[in-house]
Image (cartoon, grey):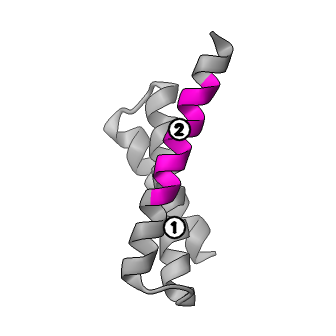
Amino acid sequence: MKNSKFIIDKFAKLIEQGLVSSKDLTSELLNIFKSKRDEFVFKMKLTSKDEFEILSKRVESLEAKIKKLSKKKKN
């Protein structure tokens, strides 16, 4: 219940700030979910903070490469 309340509060705050376009809303929701995911991993203590940051950067790099390749494939 606490997590859903957090997400609803964040969503309401976005609407209050006037983020109307779907791209802005989508990116903000993704950022909220990513931060919650990161928080969850930290709580589980699966990795050290330094190791998690390195792995997170690697994942972001791979996601960027995937997006770039998918754009090339569409063209």
Please state which of residues 51 and 28 is positioned toward the viewer in this rendering: 51
Mark 2 surroundings: few (<14), some (14-19) or many (≥20) residues within 10 A: few
Provide the residue designation for mark 1.
36
Q: Is residue 68 above or below residue 56?
A: above
Which residue occupies 39% across, 33% down? 19
x then y, percent, for residue 45 = 52, 90
SS assignment for the magenta stretch, majority: helix
11 drawn magenta? no
Do residues under tags 1 and 2 come within 8 Å of each other at their CB atoms? no
Residue under label 2, please give it.
Answer: 65
Q: Element under label 1? A: helix
Kind of residue at disc 1: Lys
Residue drawn at the location 49% of the way across and 70% of the way down: 38
Compare marks 1 and 2 and give the one earlier in the sequence. Answer: 1
Question: In front here: 47 or 31?
Answer: 47
Task: Measure how far apart labels 1 and 2 are at the Cα level.
Answer: 24 Å
Report crowding for label 1: few under 14, some 14 to 19, many 20 or more residues within 10 A (C-alpha).
some
Task: Pick the quarter of the image with the N terminus.
Answer: bottom right
Q: Residue furthest top?
A: 75
Q: Which mark is residue 46?
A: none
| Residue 42 seen | yes
- Foreground mark, 1 or 2, reads 2
**Of the residues shown, which amino acid type is indicated by label 2?**
Lys
| Coordinates of residue 60 in the picture (x, y in percent) | 47, 51
Residue under the point 53% across and 38% down: 65
**Residue 10 position by quadrant:** bottom left
In this picture, which residue range is highlighted in magenta? 58-70
Question: Against 38, is 34 above or below?
Answer: above
Q: Residue at x 62, y 9 (%)?
A: 75
